[in-house]
């Protein structure tokens, strides 16, 4: 993009004199109703737990892909509060992020599953994924279309379930691929995932999913740095855009061998595109 001489400073930087010209384009912004999901480590405070939430229908406010507030699992709201953004991204349809090092804000309706007031420190993380309600074009039909990783948070390896204690730590999501069959009414297919745990040991997962464009769920099994019976994976997500341009996914991989505490597993969120 080109700027005239009166719109830049002496170094040719348009952001100083016209900061609005530097707002990140193509990222989800404003207030909207849509789909959202969270996945998180154990945290400090009452009712600590770790894992993957159910997919919600609610409302949210975002600014250039960063969450300002969103409906929480128990009907309250969650905001970044005093936390820091470790990662964020997405596109104009779906946004994701991971919050660390602070206390989540918002309001609590159900103290057992809402997250306002949760404290995050060390490797503790709160992952979120939110996007516009799908409006798939009638008659759209996709067959064996491959969706590949576009952006993601670093997975958190954490004890799962309620009342657990341990030491969460970040790993790496190396790859995530979905092969999709989709119409305006249904969505099915398979997925594969490769993660690396905090000790740099790989975990490979394959599975299948089904549902509708507005809600898919599925599961799979894994091998590599898993417990004796192998890893188990759960995924949940949704498509967005008139032509299913974007796929948002949250996941939980259980029974990993990395020692982060009782029932250690990995959680995270990701965005994919064909």
Image (cartoon, helix red, strand yellow):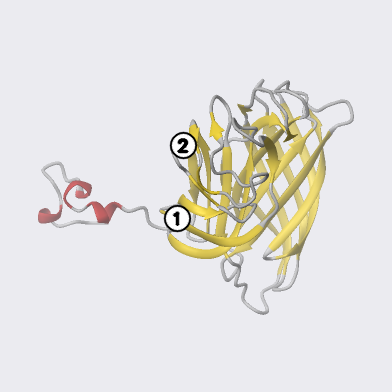
| x 43%, y 37%: residue | 82
Q: Quadrant of the N terminus?
A: bottom left
Q: Secondary structure at mark 1?
A: strand
Q: Quadrant of the C terminus?
A: bottom right
Disc 2 crowd rating (10 Å Cα; few below 14, some 14-19, many 20+) is many
Labels 2, 1: front one: 2
| x 73%, y 35%: residue | 162
Q: Secondary structure at mark 2?
A: loop
Quadrant of res 196: top right
| x 49%, y 39%: residue | 87
Image coords of residue 213 (percent x, y):
68, 66
Q: Is residue 51 left or right of residue 94?
A: right
Identify the residue under disc 2: 83
Is any part of residue 246 visible from this angle? no
Q: Which mark is residue 62?
A: 1
Location of residue 113 with respect to 86 vertically, above or below: below
User: Residue at the bottom extreme?
Assistant: 138
Quadrant of res 245: bottom right
CA gap, disc 2 and disc 1: 16 Å
Image coords of residue 32 (percent x, y):
49, 65
Location of residue 170 with respect to 184 vertically, above or below: above
């Amino acid at each position: 993009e080109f700027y005239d001489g009166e719109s830049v400073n002496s170094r040719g930087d348009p952001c100083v004199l016209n900061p609005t010209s530097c707002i990140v384009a193509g990222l989800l912004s404003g207030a909207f109703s849509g789909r959202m999901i969270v996945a998180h480590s154990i945290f400090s405070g009452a009712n600590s737990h770790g894992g993957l939430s159910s997919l919600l229908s609610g409302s949210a406010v975002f600014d250039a892909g960063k969450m300002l507030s969103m409906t929480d699992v128990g009907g309250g709201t969650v905001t970044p509060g005093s936390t820091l953004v470790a990662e964020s991204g997405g596109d104009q349809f779906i946004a994701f992020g991971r919050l660390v090092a602070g206390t989540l804000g918002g309001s609590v309706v159900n103290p057992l599953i809402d997250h306002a007031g949760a404290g995050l420190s060390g490797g503790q993380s709160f992952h979120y994924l939110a996007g516009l309600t799908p409006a798939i074009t009638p008659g759209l039909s996709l067959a064996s279309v491959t969706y590949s990783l576009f952006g993601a948070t670093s997975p958190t390896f954490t004890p799962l379930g309620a009342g657990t204690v341990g030491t969460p730590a970040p790993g790496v999501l190396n790859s995530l691929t979905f092969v999709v069959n989709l119409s305006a009414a249904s969505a099915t297919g398979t997925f594969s995932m490769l993660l690396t745990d905090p000790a740099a040991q790989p975990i490979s997962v394959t599975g299948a999913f089904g549902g509708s464009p507005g809600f898919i769920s599925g599961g799979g099994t894994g091998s590599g740095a898993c417990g004796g019976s192998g890893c188990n994976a759960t995924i949940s997500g949704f498509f967005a855009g008139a032509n299913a341009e974007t796929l948002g996914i949250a996941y939980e991989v259980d029974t990993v061998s990395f020692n982060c505490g009782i029932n250690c597993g990995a959680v995270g969120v990701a965005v994919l595109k064909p």
